[in-house]
Image: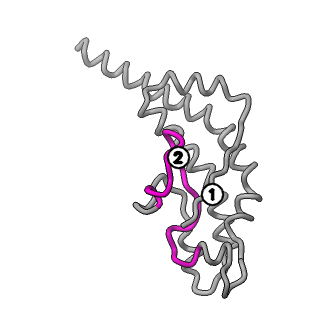
Amino acid sequence: MARQIVSVKVEGLRELETALAELPKATGKNVLRRVLKKAGQPIADSGEAYAPRLSGKLAQSYTVSTKLTRRQRRASKKESPVEVYVGPTPHPKSVQTEFGNAHQAPEPHMRPAWDGNKERALQIVKDDLGSEIQKAAERLAKKAARLAAKAQA
């Protein structure tokens, strides 16, 4: 499956980046994963809506995930500690349908989904990242207080 890399430059999130760095590494990754999956869902939903419905299997295969197939992992180098992928699962006809071939005209479904929802996804990241960091920090503080109380007892 062809992988298209899209870079997005976001400005004004330096305070959130600092707050994220204060969390333990695993907790920070989990926070990012949750927010990115939530931000990717509107793109997946839109791609599913745009996908052609010959048998319905292509539309049903849309997902938001942190995992790639073994073949996709070999073809892709990891760019960031946390990456989320949106699109159809490795369905044999997904690339052929999106881009076409000598026997079939293209029927784009992923590109219009991305174009129509990229700003919304970015807004979700902007809106939710701060609250997710805050929730994670509160959970860590509660856990530390519990452990401290247990140690005193």
Q: Position of residue 74 (x, y in %)?
A: 43, 56
> Which is nearer the eye, 149 or 115?
115
- Which residue lies at the image location 60% right of the left edge and 27% below the top edge? 17
Query: Height in image: 91 above or below 11?
Result: below
Query: Height in image: 26 above or below 53?
Result: above
- Residue 84, disc: none
Q: Amino acid at mark 2?
A: Glu
> Which is nearer the eye, 137 or 19?
19
- Residue stretch in magenta: 72-94
Q: Quadrant of the N terminus?
A: bottom right
Q: Position of residue 73 (x, y in %)?
A: 45, 56
Whichever of callouts 2 and 1 sits on the residue coming sooner in the sequence is 1
- Which residue lies at the image location 53% right of the left edge and 40% below the top edge? 80
Disc 2 to disc 1, C-alpha distance: 13 Å
Would you say residue 98 sits in the magenta stretch?
A: no
> What is the secondary structure assignment of the residue under circle 2?
loop
Category of crowding for the residue at label 1, using alpha-carbon neighbours closer than 10 angstroms: few (below 14), some (14–19), many (at least 20): few
Category of crowding for the residue at label 2, using alpha-carbon neighbours closer than 10 angstroms: few (below 14), some (14–19), many (at least 20): some
- Which residue lies at the image location 61% right of the left edge and 56% below the top edge? 41
Q: Position of residue 2 (x, y in %)?
A: 58, 64
Query: Height in image: 92 above or below 24?
Result: below
Quarter occupied by residue 15: top right
Prevailing SS of the magenta stretch: loop
Relative to 116, 83 lies left or right: left
Q: Give the residue pinned by disc 2.
A: 83
